[in-house]
Image: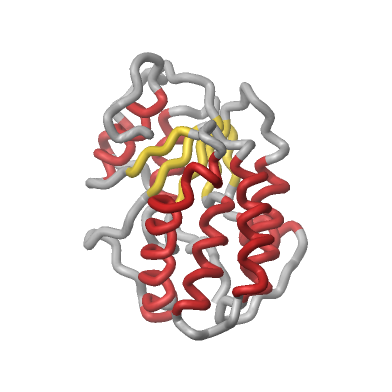
Amino acid sequence: MAVRHEWRAFRPPRFLATLGMTRRLAIMRIVVSGTHCSGKTTLAEDFLRRHPEYAHEPEPYEWLSEARGADFSAELTAADVWQQLEISVERLSRHGPGSNVIAERSPIDFLAYLEALSTLGREDTSRMLDGARDLASRGMEQVDLLVVLPLNDDIEAPEDEDPELRDAMNLALLEIIENEWDDLSSGQVRLAEITGTREERLDALESALRPGPASAFLR
């Protein structure tokens, strides 16, 4: 299974349609992080609806499959993950300081998928992890705010989205953030863990970006 985007028709909710003005936010490179089927695309779409001045970076899977015609296997492999990690870092490097951009998936996501594949006994990724950490750390140099979306009960994943891997990646990601954040971010990236309803997540993201004192959930 590739780490992929689920295509669907998007209809903005009423709370977005009623907003007539773009709220003033700090200029920032935002990356939305989380396992598959965790709400990343929905949050990015809702944010872009309110803030069209921001550029959008889709998941590396989309860029690879559409622009390069990459052929992924039905089940995610470590080679797939590594390729997407490289593209994630490459695409983020195109947005220098002072850019307004929101990207789906962080380099750390792919490190978490490598950890998850190993934890589940699907592949031995031990020889890849040090290199993946170095690459993820370089990619995070191009990020100002990392938004982490932990799994919640509001979003269900169908069986063909590999729920076992979804859960394992979520746990691996949260452990990486807890134990390796300072090394991977070099102390330069703000971190926000966002939960709640669709509207609450969007409001929390905007709060993290407004000029002024950092919110309590920011590191």
Task: Check the picture and name the quadrant holding the N terminus.
Answer: bottom right
Against 200, is 113 above or below?
A: below
Q: Position of residue 125 (x, y in %)?
A: 60, 75
* Occupied quadrant, residue 80: bottom right
Query: Residue lying furthest right in this view?
Result: 68
Task: Please name the residue shown 53% across and 52% down the image.
Answer: 105
Viewer can see residue 77:
yes
Task: Left or right? Give the position of 2 relative to 128.
Answer: left
Task: Check the picture and name the quadrant holding the C terminus.
Answer: top left
Residue 22 or residue 24, whichever sits in front: 24
Against 163, is 219 above or below?
A: above
Q: Position of residue 182 (x, y in %)?
A: 49, 42
Task: Left or right? Give the position of 200 relative to 60.
Answer: left
Viewer can see residue 9:
no
Q: Position of residue 95 (x, y in %)?
A: 67, 33
Task: Please name the residue shown 54% across and 25% down the image.
Answer: 53
* Occupied quadrant, residue 183: top right
Task: Left or right? Give the position of 79 relative to 173.
Answer: right
Residue 160 or residue 166, whichever sits in front: 166
Q: Position of residue 43 (x, y in %)?
A: 39, 44
Task: Please name the residue shown 51% across and 69% down the image.
Answer: 115
